[in-house]
Structure formats: C-alpha cells, structure tokens
Image (tube, rainbow, N blue to C red):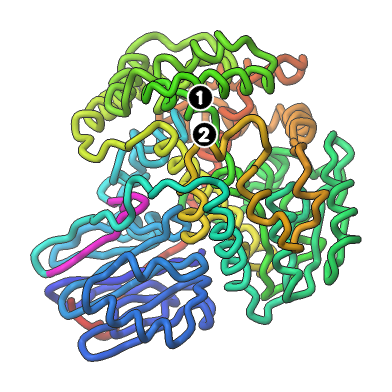
Amino acid sequence: MRWSTGWYGRQLACWRPRQGRLLADLAMWQCGWPAGQVRTATGRNVSLAVIGDCGADDEHLDSGLAAVTNQDWPSLTKWPGSYLVVARTGATLAVIGDLSTQHPVYWCSAESGLWWSTSAIALASMKSLPVDRVSLAARLACAQPEVLGSRSLFEGVHRVPSGHLLLVNPDRASTIRYEPSKYPVHSVQDAASKVRVSLEDAVDARLDGRPVSADLAGLDSTTLVCLAARRNPVHAVTFANRRLRDDDEYYATRTARAVGSVRHTLVEGGPSAVYYHACCIDLESLPLTDAPHAYVVTASIKRAVLGAVAVPGGVHFTGSAGDGVLATGSAYLADLVRTRRYGLALRHMLGHARLRSRSPWRVLRQHWPAAHGDLRRAWHACARDLRSPPRPWEPQAARPVSWTPLLATADWMGRRARADLADAFDEAAEGLTDSPPSLADWSDRQHLVDIAGDIAGWRELALHDHGVELAAPFLDNGVIRACLTVPAEQRGSPDQYKRLLTNAFSGAEIVPDFVLNRHTKGGFDGVSYGGLVSHAEGLRRLLGSSSCLADLGLLTPGHVTDTLGRAVTGLPLAAGALHLVTAAEVWLRQLDTAQSWWERMPHAAPAG
C-alpha cells in the first residue's frame, strides 16, 4: 500500500517506516511511491513536497516556496492533479490533503511529538490501537465519512476533515479550514468554460509518457477518453457482459470509431464477473486497504476489465465521481423550500416526479422535514431513531430525505452498538460549530469523500494486480471547485441530463455531439443480482455469527439471511446495505493479517 508519514517533535524519531524513503528536509518518508510522483523544492529555511499526480512544473514548485513562507496554504492546492502537500517554514509544518481526501491526512500524538500519515492503519499499528467500533458503526449506518468529525476508524488516531489542513508548530497541532464552506455562485453558462479547462488540465497532468488506458461507457468516462486521445493513444475498454441491459456498448463502439487514437476492447468477463465473487471465493487475493471500500464487491469485474487493457507502469482513467460533481441528488429541493423559492421548487418537484413516476405530493412530503431542519437537529433525530426499535425495511428512496439518512445497516446492528452510536450522534450535534450552509452542499461533499474512499480501494487493486495507476480526474481539486460553483438546482435540474458537461463541451469539437446528447445511463443490477444468487452461501458464511462484525455487535446475521432470501425469490432488497457490510467485514479480516509497518531507527532523523 502506498503511503506517506512524518514526525514532528522535540526529540529525534525512534521509528521509521519499513522500506520508506526519507525526505530529510521535511522529516518525512515516502512508501511505495515512484520517484516521479514525489517532487520537492527547498529554499532558505523553507521546504515543499508534492506527492501524487501534480501538474505543477519545477518553476511552479519554486514559486510555491514563497506561498509557504507567507503561509498562503490554499494556493498550494490549486495546481492540476491529485496530490498531497507537505510544507515547512521555520518551525511551522503544514500537511494538506486534497478536497475529496483521496490523499487523507491522519495524526496521533506521541510522548515527545506527533506523527502524521496518509494511512490510519500505519499509525494505529505503531501503538497497537484498536478499531473505533463507534466510528465504524457510523460509516455503516449513514455512509457519510465525516459525521463524527475528526474521529478515524481507529481509537487515538485523528482524521483531518476534507477542506482542512493539519498545522503543527512547537505550541500545538490543529486542523485549519483552507477551503470555503460555500463557493461563489456561477450559472451553468458562466462555469462551462472553466469546467472544460479544469478537466483538460486534470487529464493532461497524467499524460506524461505512460501508456494510457481508460473505461469507455457513460458520458463521464467517454469525455475523459476523448480528452486523453487529443494527445495520446488510448486503449479503451467497455464491460459488455450479457447480464447488462443498457446501451453503453453501442455508444462506446460508436465513439471509438469517431475519435482518433482510440483502440477499443469489449470485455464479457465470463461467469466470475459478478458481484461478490472475489470476497467469497478469493478473499486472500484482495490487497489491504486503509478503509473499507465498495470495490471488494466488484473486484472480479474490475480485474477482468483492467486485465484486458492495463499495461504495467501505465495510467488508467475512470469517469467514476463524475456524478458527484456534474449532477446531484434531489436533496436540493429541500433547500429551495427552506429558502422560500417556491415557484422554482414546484417546477423541479414536478420534473423529478415525472422522472420517477411518482406523485408530486409524495416528492414534497419526502423533502418537507429536511426543509425545516438543519444538520444539528438531523443528528439528534438520528440519535432518537437509534434508541428506538429497528425499523421495518423499505427502499431507501421511499424514506424521507434527511441531512444524514440512516441506512438499513443501522437497523442490522445490535442494541448496544445502536445506543453507543446514538450517544456519538448527540455528542457530535452538540459540538457542531461549522454548520454547512445547505443540505445540498453537505450531501454533495460527503458523497465525494465517500466516492474517493472507494476509489482509493480500487486504486490499490489496480496497483496490486496490474501495476497500473488509477486516475479519477473528476475528483481533482480544480474540477470540484469549477463544478460546485454551479448551484445544485442547476446541476440537478430534471429537464437536462448533466447539462454542465454538455455546456462545457458543446462546440469544442472534443466530445462527439451524439455523446453529449445522450440521456441514458448504464446499470449493473443484473450483474449484482447474479452475484447475489450464485454466492449466497458464501455470503452467509462471510457474514454469519462468526463474522468480525457480529463480534463487534455491528451486524445481526439474521438480517443478511433475510436479504439473501429476498434476492433468491426476486424481491426488492437492501442491496446497498449488503455491499457496505461485506466491504467492512473483508476489511476487518484483512487487519488480522496486516503487515509490519515500522522498524527502529538505526540513527536519528531530523527533529521538529
């Protein structure tokens, strides 16, 4: 697993990561990163490092030293790409992750200083710190990674929230917000050119001579293929399993014919290319990741796809996360009601009702409670619900919209776990000092952090199995900033599919018009259902009474049995909840076989 770590303290470091490469000016180590993705600049009493895919050239990095001296931290996050920043001026150290936390930052205190790292597991292993059961319960219960603020998945390891940096000096360590909680507002038309440029820069930052492969399916991934093909041959791949019932294959094949420099491969995948195959049949082959992630469920599919096109040392583009910045869920309807924009709210509710074949009044009823609440009240409401008996299952889409919706996984937990999580929600609500400005802003940013955690898991799979770097440009800082300046009601408008991307590339002669005019989206329901049926027995064993989750009180196995029974009989079921608990169970089992992360220092490292 790739990771970075560093020491700040009054005494010399006693430990170092195994097989780590020391960057002495910053008292930090790089583990598993290729030399080309670790770049530094130094000056008089000032140092800077960027780790990852960063589009800054040497001149940009040298000019960044002035920003470090002036402690102008936000300017260091505005280069294209996805990267970690570590900067030092005098006795002040700043560690800055990206907005989506693809490069997360954690820290823990030591007797004479502080360790920081991009790996929570590594920090926890130093002191043999246990899993934070309540924090893991929160992840399972609502899939919003930041509901418990700075708590990580391990007791004693602190997490730096998205949009914040870790600032350390001799007096204290603190997390400082570097990103505004709300962006300036721009219309789709005004933001379109900036969105296009930010995506062009994001793709170009990865085109550095490495072989390029890419997913070619929906509108988002197709856009990235077209951008990469301007400058580089691209080997594009489409998963075309017979269980899929969509038109991705048609559009992908047509795009490959229309765009130069694109070689196209269709992958059927075979009988193992279904959900749950790897975690039920070949769990030991899955690489260790720093947190649970959804791609353990689809690992066999990703392996089939990457195996057809990936070249060791290459870069593979995915359009994943495009939905998170180019569109939005319907939660913004509650914001329209709360801010008394009733005419616009009515028009949008009518549009969403038509799309989902529902009554407009039902849409209104679902959004009405959230329109008259805020995040603090929502967390107190979660606590009350958790102290009540578990709810009968119904599809999540049928439940009222909430700032923090409790998923079916919350109802699968034991009484003690629910009570402890309720206490944590109440505590978080009382300690909330930075309330988000709107439901849509909060939901969108949590969704991006959740996606980034999943993609981090996929990235480890790609590196472990194929030696290829996974690139998700829609999660780059510049792309997020450009897209989220457009209000949610414009990005989520029901009358035009992904109008922001369409406006950004219309007339640019980069993405074919027939792609931009597409209004359909593929789905994996058939592949998911096939995996549930064929691996039902394996899931019962994985998630049974002897599971790690059951031992922690986070899963009552009878719920899994009921869910699998519904799958076999073709009834609606809590598929998302099953994905979550499967990913968490696999992760907990992997922790028992985790590597040895640290070794004693044979000589001293630079002091803080």
Q: Is 165 within the magenta?
A: yes
Which amino acid type is shown beneath numbered disc 1?
Answer: Leu
Which amino acid type is shown beneath numbered disc 2?
Answer: Glu
Q: On the rendered structure, is 211 left or right of 331?
A: right
Q: On the rendered structure, is 566 left or right of 404?
A: right
Q: Position of residue 436 (x, y in %)?
A: 32, 37
Q: Residue furthest bottom?
A: 44
Give the quadrant of residue 63: bottom left
Q: Secondary structure at mark 1?
A: helix
The residue sitting at 31% across, 61% down in the picture is 126
Please tell me the numbered disc located at residue 489: 2
Q: Is residue 70 above or below residue 274?
A: below
Q: Position of residue 262 (x, y in %)?
A: 83, 67
Disc 2 to disc 1, C-alpha distance: 9 Å
Q: Earlier in the sequence, mark 2 or mark 1?
A: 1
**Residue interval drawn in magenta:** 157-169
Please tell me the numbered disc located at residue 415: none
Give the quadrant of residue 568: top right
Q: On the rendered structure, is 259 left or right of 199?
A: right
Q: Quadrant of the C terminus?
A: bottom left
Q: Is 112 within the magenta?
A: no
Marks 2 and 1 close (CB-CB < 8 Å): yes
Within 10 angstroms of label 1, few (less than 14), some, or many (20 or more) residues?
few
The residue sitting at 61% across, 18% down in the picture is 350
Q: Is residue 553 visible?
A: no
On the image, numbered disc 1 is attached to which residue? 344
